[in-house]
Image (spheres, grey):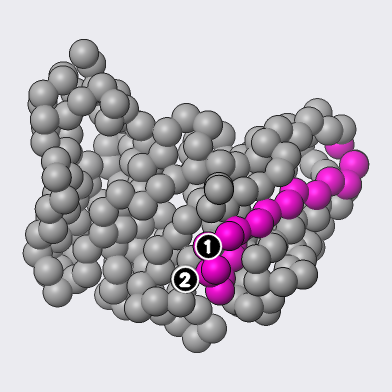
Amino acid sequence: DTAVSQTPKYLVTQMGNDKSIKCEQNLGHDTMYWYKQDSKKFLKIMFSYNNKELIINETVPNRFSPKSPDKAHLNLHINSLELGDSAVYFCASSYRGRYEKLFFGSGTQLSVL
Amino acid sequence: QQQVKQSPQSLIVQKGGISIINCAYENTAFDYFPWYQQFPGKGPALLIAIRPDVSEKKEGRFTISFNKSAKQFSLHIMDSQPGDSATYFCAASMYRTGGFKTIFGAGTRLFVKA
């Protein structure tokens, strides 16, 4: 009964490969996000989707392409992986309330070799 | 103008002591200030939050103090326990066209010594 689940937990791949991370939430939330956490633990928003519509795209290279097939799912596809893409990627969701309360998944540790 | 500055970067506290983490923001459009707690291998989880019309909010051992004029807020953890050892993030959130935006501080790694 995990609220926000993302797979895989770990992803190890070679430079230049293409990979995807999947995310699903069962909280009935309207908005979903991808955050990137670097090695210094800094959390930065990448994208947010509201009801399958892209709301925020924070100067992320266009090698990163989010896809939201429905409001419970938000996947992240990364083309031509680079060493600098190594990080932990978190999916999150929030409900449409007066304030933004984020519910995070457990993260995907991406290592690009 | 959307930066949130957090200090200290790391903190070691004795069991039973008070842990204090400070944050400062610049943009007065922010209207919600949450704190998130992150354990190793897990995602951040909302711990406690405050609105700028309130100067203090307490939930159990956790208290947020908010100084609107100084644009600063802080998290106090009373009677700190080893189980509180985690990374803490302050954040500031606002609504803008299309949706909310939350900016996170750089995080504070707290270690509580038994």
SS class, disc 2: loop
Would residue B8 be found to the left or right of residue B86 on screen?
Answer: left
Q: Quadrant of residue B98?
A: bottom right
Could you say where residue B22 lies in the image, as x and y percent from the top left? 22, 47
- In the picture, the disc for residue A95 is 2
* Mark 2 residue type: Tyr
Depth check: give the residue in front, A29 or A33: A29
Which residues fall within the magenta stretch?
A: A15-34
* Mark 1 residue type: Leu
Look at the image and tell me whether residue B86 can be seen.
yes
Q: Earlier in the sequence, mark 2 or mark 1?
A: 1
Depth check: give the residue in front, B25 or A64: A64
In the image, what residue occupies the spot 22% across and 42% down? Answer: B21
Q: Are marks 2 and 1 in contact (CB under 8 Å)?
A: yes
Could you say where residue B64 lies in the image, as x and y percent from the top left? 16, 53
Q: Quadrant of residue A33?
A: bottom right
Q: Mark 2, mark 1: which one is toward the viewer?
A: 1
Which chain is mark 1 on?
A: A
Which chain is mark 2 on?
A: A
SS class, disc 1: loop
- The quarter of the image holding the C terminus of chain B is top left
In the image, residue A95 above or below residue A27: below
Could you say where residue A16 lies in the image, as x and y percent from the top left? 90, 41
Residue designated by label 1: A27
In the image, what residue occupies the spot 12% across and 69% down? Answer: B54
In the image, residue A87 above or below residue B79: below
